[in-house]
Image (tube, helix red, strand yellow):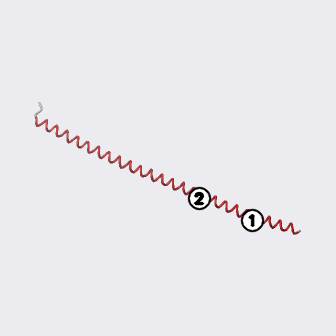
Amino acid sequence: MITTRESEIAERTKKIELIEASKEAERQAIGIKVQAEAEKQASADRAGAMLEAARGEADAEKLRADASRVRFEVEAAGQRAVNEAANLLSSDR
């Protein structure tokens, strides 16, 4: 037969265990949340780095295209000058 005192002690022990279990669940939830936030930040950092790399590559491609255009313009101007000189020489003869 359980006395009232024993019943109260059992009830109090049960409440204490529930509180401790709740505290542990909160600690675990906080740990999971912190880990998720860290992963989220790392993912955002990786995405930012990839975006910057893509922008850098796009800028480099634009510079290469500009350099090619200038090189072709210079080569064309040089070829034009050579052709004009050849035309002048051939018309003088």
- Answer with mark 2 or mark 1, whichever residue precedes in sequence: 2
- Residue drawn 77% across the image and 64% down it: 80
Task: Report the residue that reaches farthest toward the bottom.
Answer: 92
Residue 78: which numbered mark, if any?
1
- Residue drawn 48% across the image and 51% down it: 47
Q: Quadrant of residue 4?
A: top left
Question: Comparing marks 2 and 1, which lies closer to the viewer?
Answer: 1
Q: Quadrant of residue 56?
A: bottom right
* Front position in the image: 13 or 76: 76
Q: Position of residue 64 (x, y in %)?
A: 63, 59
Position of 31 with respect to 71 (left or right) is: left
Residue 29: which numbered mark, if any?
none
* Front position in the image: 60 or 31: 60
Residue picked out by circle 2 = 60
Question: Label 2 to label 1, Cα distance in Å?
Answer: 27 Å
Task: Report the residue that reaches farthest toward the right.
Answer: 93
- Residue drawn 32% across the image and 45% down it: 29
Q: Position of residue 55 (x, y in %)?
A: 54, 56
For the image, the number of numbered tags is: 2
- The kind of secondary structure element at disc 1 is helix
The amino acid pointed to by label 2 is Ala
The amino acid pointed to by label 1 is Gly
